[in-house]
Image: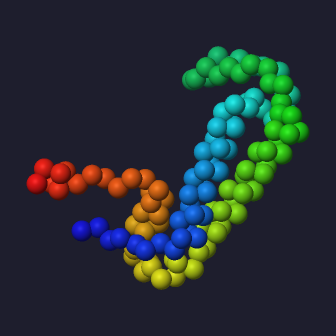
Amino acid sequence: MATTYDFPSDLLAGQEELHQVRAELATLLKRLPWSVEPLDGFSDTGGWRKVERPASPGWTPDEQAEVEKLRQREHELAVFVSGHRFWTEVTTAERVESRMKLKHAHEAPPVDEKADNG
């Protein structure tokens, strides 16, 4: 049977916010132009893979600030979660498993089919 962990509420909250910040950053980066600075478009068909990019107007100062703010918060949360005192209570052999469980703690637990069919 898989081990369950009693994660502290601040660690769970930090991990959940880390998921949210990463999702928000990924969404923002997909929306922004491919280059931070204004650059001309290009096409390179001579390599093993064709690469094309349209001209990029660059990011506005507000967009740059928003990306920087999210990246800074992501870093703060990653340091908080990875350096949390809880990890000193987990044996070295169990740390990877417990870290993976924390990453997925916000998800609904899988349905036990045996219990449902019983």
Quadrant (top left, top right, bottom left, bottom right) of the C terminus: bottom left
The image quadrant that residue 25 belongs to is top right
Q: Residue at the spot x=23%, y=54% of the render?
A: 112
Residue 104, image x and y in percent?
44, 57
Identity of the residue furthest to the left in this view: 118
Identity of the residue furthest to the bottom in this view: 89
Q: Is residue 32 above or below residue 15?
A: above
The image quadrant that residue 35 belongs to is top right
Task: Report whether 65 appears left or right of 27.
Answer: right
Residue 87, image x and y in percent?
51, 77
Q: In this view, does 90 lie above or below 44?
A: below
Q: Residue at the spot x=29%, y=67% of the render?
A: 2
Task: Report whether 117 appears left or right of 13.
Answer: left
Task: Report whether 9 appears left or right of 36.
Answer: left
Q: Residue at the spot x=57%, y=53% of the render?
A: 19
Say how the picture is coloured: rainbow
**Whether residue 45 is visible:** yes
In terms of depth relative to the viewer, which is nearer, 92 or 61? 61
Q: Residue at the spot x=75%, y=29% of the render?
A: 33
Residue 92, image x and y in percent?
44, 78
**Whether residue 82 is visible:** no
